[in-house]
Image (cartoon, rainbow, N blue to C red):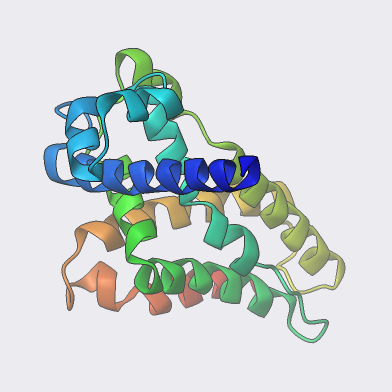
Amino acid sequence: MVRKTKEEAELTRRHIIDAARHVFRDCGVRNSTLEKVAAAAGVTRGAVYWHFRNKTELFFAMREASTLPFVDRVVFNLDDRDPLAGIEAALREIFIILEDEPAVREIFEIVSFKCEYVDEFSAMMHCTDGQLEFLHKLIEAYRQAQEKGAVRAGLNAEDLARDTFLFISGLIKHWLAAKPGEPFRCDMLHLIHCHVMLRRP
């Protein structure tokens, strides 16, 4: 019976996070309240407070939920014949996830456009653990590519990784803001390909 109760509590927690995503998307984070989230989730305000102390904690939980698909799917599989192709495939996979997973895409839109990073949210302007892990994986991928002679001479693996990190961060925001058929949306694969091509010998 206790186990079932824990499972039900976890389901309620996830349901609240989903409801928060909809409220944050529709109202913006600043204008959202836990009362609105409770109403959207169909639970009492007390149920929301039982899982989350405040809106900031709920926002963090929602943001963390968006990282899970990337952990499993954005993998740098480096082919000995063409190591940079593995980096390009990993970058492309980010956008495939954003296209395949509407909930993940909505969270990225909220984080990018629906939140003011002031007061208790100012700490969220820093890189998340997931982003830092992605950067470390990029550095290692470029280092391996460099060791295999797949990168132009004189380029540093860490600098390349930081450049790619900033490139992909900016491209995600412009891709999210663009409508179907607009340049950053329809040219995304081409832009990634060109970015990687500039690293080749």
Q: Position of residue 188 (x, y in %)?
A: 36, 73
Name the residue at the front extreme. 1
- In depth, the one of 21 and 85 nearer the eye is 21
Up the image or down, 32 lies above or below 65; here it is above
Residue at 41 percent across and 19 percent down: it is: 53
Looking at the image, which residue sits at the far top? 119
- Residue at point 78% right, 68% down? 145
Q: Which residue in the rendered view is the most extreme toward the bottom?
A: 81
The answer to whether 94 is drawn above or below residue 133 in the figure is below
x%, y% of residue 39?
A: 17, 37
> In front here: 186 or 102?
102
In this view, the residue in front, 197 or 104, is: 104
Figure quadrant of residue 153: bottom right
Q: Across the whole image, how many numbered discs are drawn on residues?
A: 0
Instruction: Please give the name of the residue rendered at 71% of the width and 54% of the height, measured from the top-left corner.
Output: 137
Vertical arrangement, residue 190 with respect to residue 106, above or below: below
Residue for point 61% across, 44% down: 1
Residue 78 horizontal side relative to residue 42, left or right: right
Residue 43 percent coordinates (x, y): 27, 37
Outermost residue to the right: 147
Q: Relative to residue 123, is residue 42 drawn left or right? A: left
In the picture, the quarter occupied by the C terminus is: bottom right
Whether residue 100 appears in this view of the structure is yes
Vertical placement of 195 versus 154: above or below?
below
Q: Pick the residue in front: 123 or 140.
A: 123
Indicate the quadrant where residue 45 lies: top left
Residue 86 at x, y = what percent? 67, 76
* Whether residue 33 is visible: no
